[in-house]
Image: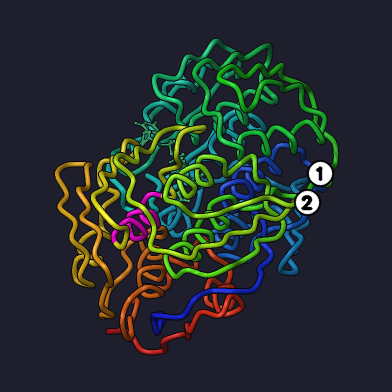
Amino acid sequence: MGYRVIGGRRLCGEVVIGGCKNAVLPILAATVLTGGKSVIHNCPDILDTHTSIEILRHLGCKVEYDGTSIIVDSAAAAARALPAGPVGKMRSSIIFAGALLSRFGSFETAEPGGCRLGLRPIDLHLQAFRRMGVNFDGDSQTICGKAAELTGAKINLAFPSVGATQNVILAATLARGRTIISNAAREPEIVDLQGFLQAAGAEIAGAGTSTIVIDGVEKLQNVEYKIMPDRIVAGTYLAAGAIAGGHIRLKNVKAADIMPIIDSLEDMGINLHTEGASVVLRAKNRPNPLPILATGPHPAFPTDMQPQFTALLAIAAGHSIVIENLFEARDAHISELVRMGADIKSEGHRFYINGVERLNGAKVAAKDLRGGAALILAGLAAKGETEIHGAEYIKRGYTAIDKDLKALNAEISVLKTTP
Ligand code: EPZ
């Protein structure tokens, strides 16, 4: 499965941004904690949502999903070993460990899979669990954690890992005593997880800052919650408007969550303004280059926007340097962009870009989620036709990128054949 893009059209029109992948995944894991009913609205209909539902059902939860709202009843959940299939598909399956530890005092899983962006170890997760009283055994294939009694602890994360922060929050929610997380990740998705847990009666505060305090409670209540808009999908479509040129409006966007993206686009000479929950972009000329674009933990420029901006800078009027500080191998899109005529040299995790006037359409392959989205954006700006294979990666994080971009006047269609 893939996409065919005919480049050269300026974008216009508007799209509504859906619920956030990286918020709904930890919140679905958190439904295991309540032992009751959770109703979650604005859930994106993406592959990872369905993978999480598969894991919940495997654990004994009753789950209904109508494409936007998910109802989970976790009364009958049990601490079963997480299923190897879904775990192999999605890195964030490790988030279920914290939820299972909190509710049942144990978890068992295979090494999680997901986009190949580098090593992606889970040492910070396991280190934190150890401080909370968890002992580990298992062989090289599986990780088994058990705690006689899960207790709150002072956790200082060596790196503000999003997943480790979320996992500690889930483990601490029903643990005995207080947990203080220092050097916590500050991403908006952590704030959304806190919002869900507070709505369920958890004692948690500080999400969005580097210090989060959780006081374990006995029980959580039934909860109803609405997932935040997806800031990376919004950023991807803004980058699409910038690379193709034109005038677009994105509705249902929390501008505060995408300020690093908006600031970088304005530095490139792109005109943006916000109107309530909408962001309007006008791109008339070829974008300016960025002397340096470095990714970092929030509120720095997000790594999940690096491939899309690398594609955008590939057609900017001058030299740019992109520095990927989060993942040691988030570069699978570079070779494909070069095949489209981009002038990019990568040295380690630095990409030296000499912007070209125009890319050329080509047959390219997505090898991860955001790299795949970047190739679609490159196709919008390329001369002629681009075929992007590997749509299964892209559908992990975008409900309907083809429909959304078509609504913005792009010429994009689904490719039935594989190479
Ligand atoms: C989350 O991944 C996101 N995924 C990623 O989005 C995102 O790129 C990343 O955060 C950074 O913002 C979800 O939320 C489902 P990390 P996560 O732990 O939690 C190292 C996308 O495209 N690290 O913050 O796995 C790790 O190797 C995906 O939507 C350790 O060394 O990211 C990496 O270099 C891709 N040990 C860095 O920290 C650990 O125990 C950031 O990882 C954990 C992480």
Residue under numbered circle 2: 73
Secondary structure beneath disc 2? strand
Secondary structure beneath disc 1? loop
The spot of residue 153 in percent (x, y) is 57, 11
76 relative to 20 in the view: left or right: right
The spot of residue 76 in percent (x, y) is 74, 48
* Range covered by the magenta-colored residues: 306-314
Residue at image x 40%, y 34%?
296
Residue at image x 37%, y 73%?
381
Residue 307 lies in the magenta stretch = yes
Characterize the local packing of mark 1: few (<14), some (14-19) or many (20 or more) Cα atoms within 10 angstroms.
some
The answer to which quarter of the image holds residue 196 is top right
Amino acid at dot 1: Gly
Q: Which quadrant of the figure shows ligand 1? A: top left
Majority secondary structure of magenta residues: helix
Residue under numbered circle 1: 36
The spot of residue 279 in percent (x, y) is 65, 55
